[in-house]
Amino acid sequence: MTPRELDGMQLDTLLEAARLQNLQPSPALLARVMQDACEMQPQPALTPVPRPSMRGGVLMQILALFSGFGAAGAGLATAGLAGIWLGFAQPAPLATPVEAVSAVLQGAGDDAIDGEDADMVELIPSFDGWLAEG
């Protein structure tokens, strides 16, 4: 009898009989599977990690503490110094928009900026300003 020859009642009877059977793998099979699985697990390599020596004084220990930053620390220091420089010595093209905006925010209004000066404020300067000599 092939599966195509079974009608609905015969198929239900066959599936019910299969459902009632208690098919469990034998304990010997489970033990062999677990043994094979344990053998296939990668084993970690046990290599000793050398401990850094703390020779030198306190200054060398502080330098060793900060030397781990590498390129990230150098980039962070460069960005910090550039920020301090831009905050302290503000470039000339940025001075006019900053002064205009700060005067408006402080409530000076039309007293600080008259109609002619308000037209001169460039919040996004052009490239020509960077090419000017002098």
Image (cartoon, rainbow, N blue to C red):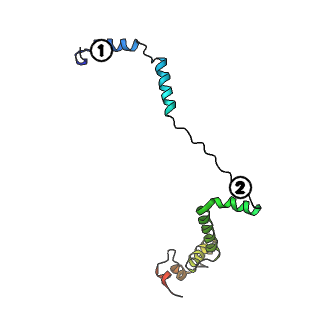
Circle 1 packing at 10 Å, graded few (<14), some (14-19), many (20+), is few
Q: Residue 64's mark?
A: none
Horizontally, residue 23 falls left or right of residue 54, namely left
In the picture shown, does residue 52 fall above or below 18?
A: below
Q: Secondary structure at mark 2?
A: loop
Taking the spot 73% from the left edge, 62% from the top edge, the residue there is: 60
Read off the residue under disc 2.
53
The image quadrant that residue 102 belongs to is bottom right
Horizontally, residue 17 falls left or right of residue 2, namely right
Circle 2 packing at 10 Å, graded few (<14), some (14-19), many (20+), is few
Image quarter hosting the N terminus: top left
Closer mark to the observer between disc 1 and disc 2: 2
* Circle 2: residue type: Ser
Horizontally, residue 93 falls left or right of residue 16, namely right
Taking the spot 69% from the left edge, 58% from the top edge, the residue there is: 65
In the picture shown, does residue 109 fall above or below 51?
A: below
Taking the spot 50% from the left edge, 74% from the top edge, the residue there is: 124
Front one among 107 and 134: 134
Where's residue 105, x and y in %? 61, 70
Where's residue 130, x and y in %? 50, 81
Read off the residue under disc 1.
11
* Circle 1: residue type: Leu
Q: Counting residues from the N terminus, which is met first, the one under dot 1 or under dot 2?
A: 1
Q: How many marks?
A: 2
The image quadrant that residue 9 belongs to is top left
Where's residue 35, x and y in %? 50, 27
Front one among 67 and 89: 67
Taking the spot 67% from the left edge, 61% from the top edge, the residue there is: 66
Give the CA distance from mark 1 to mark 2: 77 Å
Where's residue 30, x and y in %? 48, 22
